Amino acid sequence: MPNVKLYIDDSRYAEARPRISALLPGLRDMLCARLEVDRAACQLAVLPVLALPDQPGINAELHVLPRASRSRDRLEAVAAELRTLLAQDSGLTVAVRIVTLDAATYVALK
């Protein structure tokens, strides 16, 4: 269940939106393949935010449930691929953060 939020600097949102929108299906496919989940389990959201000029243009947050195959090395590789894809398509600087959730306390109603 990758849950991805892309926070895009509001001052750059209009120029980045069309390219990010076009990237979303491929981004979801990449995340599902690398994290071994079905497409229905992947949630992506893109949000314009008020940001400071010295921060990255895009901050990506990815929340995942733990799994034996999701080692730190694998998650770092996913973060690097995510950062590269977003930076290439948007032309903005990108920061990526991945959080592994506590499966014992995680609750989701769908």
Image: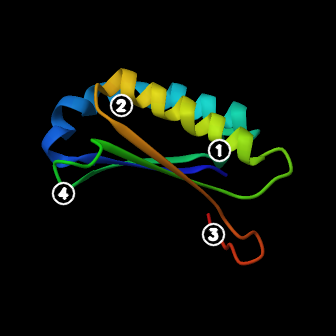
Q: Which comes sooner in the sequence, label 2 or label 4?
A: 2
Mark 3 crowdedness (10 Å alpha carbons): few <14, some 14-19, many ≥20: few
Given residues 79 and 4, the one toward you in this image is: 79
Given residues 89 and 71, the one toward you in this image is: 71
Residue at the spot of label 4 = 50
Alpha carbon distance from label 2 to label 4? 20 Å
Amino acid found under the numbered disc labelled 2: Ser
Q: Nearer the viewer, mark 3 or mark 2?
A: 2
Residue 82 rendering spot, x and y as whole percentages? 52, 34
Q: Residue 109, labelled with which disc?
A: 3
Q: Nearer the viewer, mark 4 or mark 1?
A: 4
- Residue 63 falls in which quadrant of the image? bottom right
Query: Where 52 sits versus 84, above or below?
Result: below
Q: Residue 21, labelled with which disc?
A: 2
Alpha carbon distance from label 4 to label 3? 30 Å
Left or right, residue 81 beside residue 22: right
> Which residue is depicted at the point 57% across and 39% down?
79
